[in-house]
Amino acid sequence: LHLSVCVSAALVTMAAELIQEDLTLTRRVGQSVSFSCGGTQGCSGSYIYWYQKKENETFRRILVFYESSGNTYKGYGHPQKDDFTAGKTQTEYELKINKVKVDHSASYYCSCWSHSEK
């Protein structure tokens, strides 16, 4: 029996226009999946937030990735927080699920908040 999980990413516009491609991704249970968040030139030194949105539910913040230090904070009470990791490539931010579960079926959103001082 092979169960497939459909996970999707969507665009959230904040101060910068963030671009998420591959809007629908299908994986079998136990496989890994990564979401990218590009167009983040205006997010340098920022906090990158990742959210999960399930049908008929409100947005749930999963974690925040601190671009300056590379650290991740998961203290928002998301029940699946330990299933997710976040990081940054040379050009994009990423959210990864190492082992997909049926309950991961949802839409995932990124946003950034710049805290640079003026």
Image (cartoon, helix red, strand yellow):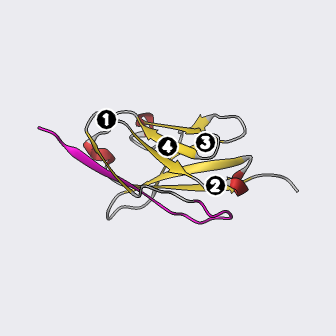
Residue 95's label in the rendered image is 4
Number of marks in picture:
4
Secondary element at tag 1: loop
Location of residue 47 in the rendering, given as x and y in whole percent from the top left corner: 66, 48
Give the mark nearest the N terminus, 1 or 4: 1
C-alpha gap between disc 1 and disc 3: 23 Å
The local crowd at label 1, few if under 14, some if 14 to 19, many if 20 or more residues have their Cα within 10 Å, is: some
> What amino acid does circle 4 point to?
Leu
The local crowd at label 2, few if under 14, some if 14 to 19, many if 20 or more residues have their Cα within 10 Å, is: many
Give the mark nearest the N terminus, 4 or 2: 4
Q: Quadrant of residue 118?
A: bottom right
Residue 31's label in the rendered image is 1
Quadrant of image for the N terminus: top left
Residue behind mark 2: 112
> What amino acid does circle 3 point to?
Phe
- Which region is colored magenta? 1-18
Give the mark nearest the N terminus, 1 or 2: 1
C-alpha gap between disc 4 and disc 3: 9 Å
- State if disc 3 and disc 4 touch (CB < 8 Å): no
> What amino acid does circle 2 point to?
Cys
Give the mark nearest the N terminus, 3 or 2: 3
The residue lying at 39 percent from left, 33 percent from top is 98
